[in-house]
Structure formats: C-alpha cells, structure tokens
Image: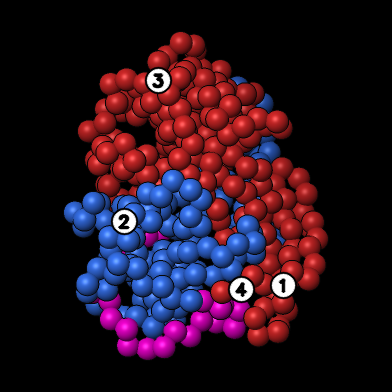
Chain colours: A blue, B red
Amino acid sequence: MEQWKKLKEELVYDDWRKVIKKSYQLPDGKTYIYDIIGNNDYVTVVAFTKDRKAILTKQFRPGPELILTSFPEGYIDEGETPQETALRELKEETGFVSDNIRLIQAFRRAYNNEKRYVLMALDCEKKFEPKGDDTEFIETELMSFEEFRAYLRQPSESGFTNTDAAYLAIDLLGWL
Amino acid sequence: MEQWKKLKEELVYDDWRKVIKKSYQLPDGKTYIYDIIGNNDYVTVVAFTKDRKAILTKQFRPGPELILTSFPEGYIDEGETPQETALRELKEETGFVSDNIRLIQAFRRAYNNEKRYVLMALDCEKKFEPKGDDTEFIETELMSFEEFRAYLRQPSESGFTNTDAAYLAIDLLGWL
C-alpha cells in the first residue's frame, strides 16, 4: 500500500487548536482536501500505587460538557521527553511521584497530527498536594484494582477516556 | 464536582471539520475560552469471523501521513442507528456481514463534541466485495486471533487506532 502524494498544505485556523488543509492526490488521480486538526503531542500516564490502586483524575470537559475520568495527561512542553512530561503531570495533577515509569506505546489518529505517548508509572507514592495550572480544577480518585478492572468493562457510557492505555498497561503487567 | 457555567458558544471555523469557541466561567470565577472540535458521531466495529479472525482495514491517513490499521469505522448518517451504521460500514469497507452485532460502549473526548460508539460484530461472513466511497482506498486484512492478541500488546508504535475497542470487546467475550 502506497503513501498518497501531498500537493499542498495550508494553515487555515490558528488559535488554541489549529486546522491544516492538506490536499492530496488520491490513488485514482483525483484531488481531495482534508481538514486536519493540529494539536501538540501529549502523554497519558497509567499510574498505580504500590497496592495497585489506579490513580485517576476527574474534570469537567468542555467538549462533551460532562465530567470525564482519565489518568493524568498533559501536553509535552518544549524540550521535555515524554517521561519528563509524564512525571510532571502526575505530580501536578495528583501529587504522586514514581521512580518506576516507562513508555509503553505511542498512538496516532487518522485526522490529527498529534502523537500520544502512553506511559506506565508503578509504585506511585503521594508526596505533594496536587497543583494544576490556572485553568485546571481536578479531583483525584484512587480506585482499587478490582473496582478499576470492573469499571473498564462496564457496558454503559462510563466517561472514562483512557480505555486503550489502561488495558494495554495491565496486559503488559500480566494483571488481566 | 460541578459542571461549569457556559457563557457563550460560537462557530468560528465551519468546513469538513468545525471549531466551536466555548467560553466558560471557571470554578474560581475567571473566564476561559476553549477551541472545541466539532465532529459528527461515528462508530467503530470490532469484527471477527466465525474462526475468530480479526477483520481489519488499512488506509493511508492524512493526519499523521502514515498507513494506519483499524477496525471498520464510519460516520453515522442522518436517521441511522449506530448498529445500522456499523453493519453498513462493515459491508462497504470489507464486504463482510454479521447477524450477531451489539453496542458495547460509547466513548467521549475532552475537547471534541463527538460521540464514538463501539460495537462488536461476531460470526462475520464475507458476502460482498468491499466498495468504499469515492475517497476510500482500503485494504482488508484478516488476522488470526493469536496474532491479533500479540499485535495489541506490541511495545512499539503499531499504527493501530482501536486499542480501546479491541481490548474491551475481547474482555467482554472472555477471550483475554
């Protein structure tokens, strides 16, 4: 399967998010233009305490206008490695630290240019009070592993946004 | 935890994708404006044949400019149920049909207004030739369950975009 030929790329919306119009020559020779969402790379940190409690965050989210649950997440600052971002976000959002952290995957999306790094932080300990940035109003929730395992597979809309990262980490850990 | 008060909502970019500026009064009284991506609701269909082969699609994707792998996916047309969309996309993209399909979850994202429905289609049989729309150039790949299970947990960037849906379905099926 071949890559398509890119004919043109133009930034058409440039604010907190960006929209990039990319024109491609399709395999049948026709031209088609896509709106691609420009977004910075970010990390998701699947974090567990020494006694396997999941360290989750709850926040109001303006997209769906609902309170959603996730692991600590955040954008990679200039010059940071994904691991540095993960430790910073874990500390800022929850007050937890870990010296057992590693990168486990990177995910891509069809119509976004972002790269999302998934890391796993184990044996986390609470050493600080959470201190999000000026626009973050985050509640930390610790969930026992058994409860978290059931939460992942519940059949209704749960408002959990990191199902991919969570399953991948606990699969790699042999905890499934 | 309380919902935030929405002060204003304005469509600021309106083409194939949309951007909506939403102004909120934050819990500390300050005002903050978010760029929310407007996107239609869509489905992901975790599809397996009678002999548990995963029915995957490969396409060039203009966001990351890479060939990515996913289950059949597509936007919900006006008046369709998620199940109708799932059966239509499964047939169009891969030529497979199923009479054993069900909705298993719906996922939300923090800064998008879309709702993504995840369905699981079992005992799929190939009855047609794939016939994507004018801009779709899709290759179907059948992957044995054992290979798919290993593919999910591989440690490098795999280009697979439905890790969440895949794990959830095989967990609910008791196949983990």
Q: Secondary structure at mark 1?
A: strand
Is residue A122 magenta-colored? yes
Same chain check for tags 4 and 3 = yes
Q: Earlier in the sequence, mark 1 or mark 3?
A: 1
| Residue assigned mark 3 | B124
Which x, y percent locates residue A107? 42, 51
Q: CA distance from mark 1 to mark 3?
A: 46 Å
- Between circles 4 and 3, the one closer to the viewer is 4
Residue A149's disc number: 2
Q: Residues within 10 Å of mark 2 (few under 14, many from 20)?
A: some
User: Given the image, what chain letter belongs to the residue carrying mark 2?
Assistant: A
User: Which region of the structure is painted magenta?
Assistant: A117-138
Expressed as whole percent of the image width and height from the top left, the position of residue A141 reads: 41, 73
> What's the residue at 67%, 59% (across, down)?
B36
List the residue tagged with mark 1: B5
Q: Which mark is residue B2?
A: 4
Residue drawn at 45 percent across, 64 percent down: A70
Q: Residue furthest left?
A: A174
